[in-house]
Image (cartoon, helix red, strand yellow):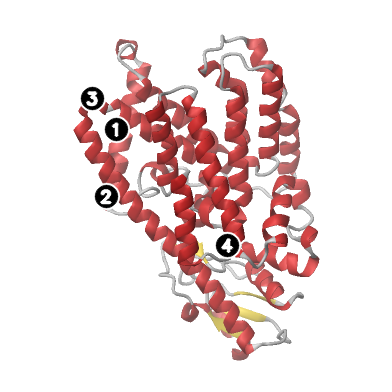
Amino acid sequence: MAAEIVIGAAYALGGAGYVLDDWFTLGNAKVDGVWGTPGHLIFVNRPGAGLLYCLVFGVFGGHPLVGLALLTALGAATAAVLYVLCRRFVSVPVAAAVATVWVVLPNHTSLEFWQSCTSLAAATLLTVVAALFVARRAPSTRQTLIAAALVTAGSLTYEAVFPVGALVVVFLPLLAGRAWRGRDLIGRASLLLPAAVYLVLYRSTQKTISKVGPLGQVLAGHFGWGIVPGGTGATVVLLVAMLALAVAGVRLALPGFRTGTGLGERLVVIGLVVIAAGTIPFTFYLYAPLGAGDRFDLVSSIGGALAWTGIGLMLWRWRTVVAAGAAVLLVMAFTARVQRMERWTTAAADSNRVARAITARFPQPPPQRVVLGPSPVQDHDVAALLDQSNVAGLLRFLYGRTVPGGIAYRRADYDRTPAAYRFDVWRLSHLRADVDLSSDRQGVPVTAQ
């Protein structure tokens, strides 16, 4: 909990601000008022998120430190509840290790720094709190109903928590020692049926992507370059983790080894189940889980923390080696966290530089379309402004009205704009562009009209 507060304070001191989709909701709030902040569809698709956006960008809009304080509070509360939840099953040191590892590993920084992720952070907290109500041998009907209500609320805030939430409500009492009874499982599952039907109907109204995302990145996102700086070190960490995960699976699967297993192996398997359930909702639109993309780790990062703690317990007989390995891993994770925090603060500063450049040239709303370019600037999936809605929202926020504007993805589109109405974001940006993750110079395919 304290570590989460320190992380939030460090980001605030580094220069917290608004980036990407933040500008869309800020612009809406400026023009359409508090209740128009998220756009009308969000109250149908994600009503919980709609209310949070009204608060963060409508009521608190223009005050990024207030929104950051809310994000930090959500993260700290999640860490505290996660500790209490784990304490139902394991000792104090193990429970503390799980919560601490979840906070320290930098594989979900968007949930700590990007204010558009407030709904994701809140949905994660609701899911963990729900688990607290049913993590017992015989949860009462009232406790089960509360857990189901919390999972439903979390799912209607951000739907990706539903698979993990369903596992929590239906199966968590079994981990606490409750007897396996099919009638009980069906009864608990039926409580989530309204949420499941609503989410299916909601998804049927959305555009779908038929191509499965790069799921091979998931394990690396939790056990390799997702938690340490990329390169040889990340490869070594990933290989060590994969070996440990394989050993845990084999020892539990083969009867001859199962009697020698302990809490470590079981935590590894539970962690992998949480990672899988947390990833399922993003199967068709997963992209590099770094920067803004690591929002896909909203609950699967908890699975990563469980698995890493389990690996440590499996190797605990070699305490000296484990302590040395943990120290190295923490140093690497801290280095990665500093790098990622710097990307977010730099992107926020870039947004402010772009805003100042626009208002300095056009104190009044420009009479024709403003274009940023010649392409967006991204650094490991962090950017100040990336698509048309970001720019349109920024202009609405700056001028209090709808102003035509957008961002170019190709040099030719940028050059067609009169010089007085285009802004070179490559000159204004201090981000170190990553050509691997972002076509033109960075991978963005076409220019929206």
Query: Do labels 4 and 2 touch, CB within 8 Å?
Result: no
Mark 3, mark 4: which one is toward the viewer?
A: 4
Where does label 3 land, which residue? 317
**Which residue occupies 68% across, 71% down?**
392
Disc nearer the start of the sequence (4/1): 4
Depth check, front residue: 352 or 63: 63
Which class describes the residues within 10 Å of circle 4: few (<14), some (14-19), or many (20+)?
many
Where does label 4 land, which residue? 65
Disc nearer the start of the sequence (4/2): 4
Q: Quadrant of the C terminus?
A: bottom right
Disc nearer the start of the sequence (3/4): 4
Q: Is residue 17 left or right of residue 238?
A: right
Q: Is residue 177 above or below residue 310?
A: above
Q: CA distance from mark 1 to mark 2?
A: 16 Å
Which class describes the residues within 10 Å of circle 1: few (<14), some (14-19), or many (20+)?
few
Where does label 2 land, which residue? 233
Q: CA distance from mark 1 to mark 3?
A: 17 Å
Q: How many marks?
A: 4
The circle on residue 243 is: 1
Q: Residue 81 at x, y = what percent?
A: 54, 35
Residue type marked 3: Arg
Question: Secondary structure under badge 4?
Answer: helix
Q: Is residue 277 above or below residue 365?
A: above
